[in-house]
Image: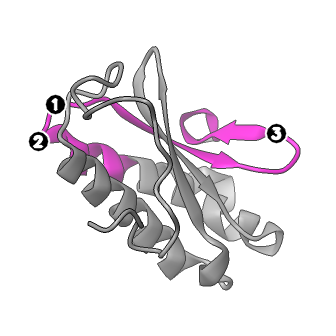
Amino acid sequence: MNGEDSFGRPREQSGFDSAQDAPHSGISPEEEERLIELVGFLVQGIVAHAEDVEVEEFFDDAGIVYGVRVHPDDLGRAIGKDGRVANALRSVVRAAALKSGARVTVEIITDDSQLRLEDAPA
């Protein structure tokens, strides 16, 4: 890995020497990268403006949070009718992270506010 993610963007320095030093992560840097790529890949397949998909990693009390930014025109596609796409995305990512035992959450980040996928209507 040359300091860029799979989307060609520079990796942000988190201030941690490894994923084990990061709060609540509990997974290796390779697994974190795999999960970020999975989220990006899935969302890019759903939206019309795939080049505008961005995935950011955060840590909170619950564990790892992957924030997804999409083009404003694609927000409805990323959430889906009654939140079905968002819930499916969250389920797939949670299942992929299950092997490592990490707790993972996915959020869709909008310019105005944040929508937690787990809070989307079922």
Is 90 placed above or below 119 here?
below
Q: Are marks 1 and 2 in contact (CB under 8 Å)?
A: yes
**In 3D space, how far apart are the residues under numbered discs 3 and 1 (Cα atoms)?**
29 Å
- Distance between the alpha carbons at the discs numbered 2 and 3: 31 Å
* Residue bearing mark 1: 101
Residue 99 numbered tag: 2
Closer-to-camera residue (94/26) = 26
Q: At which x and y percent is residue 10?
A: 50, 63
Left or right: 54 in relation to 112: left
Residue at 62% across, 52% down: 83
The answer to whether residue 55 shows anywhere in this view is yes
Q: Relative to residue 49, is residue 93 depicted above or below?
A: above
Of the numbered discs 2 and 3, the one sitting upstream in the chain is 2
Badge 1 marks a residue whose secondary structure is loop
Q: Residues within 10 Å of mark 3 (few under 14, many from 20)?
A: few
Q: Position of residue 99 (x, y in %)?
A: 11, 42
Find disc 3 in the rendering and name its residue: 113
Q: Which residues are magenta?
A: 91-120
Asked if the magenta segment contains residue 102, the reply would be yes
Q: Secondary structure at mark 2?
A: loop
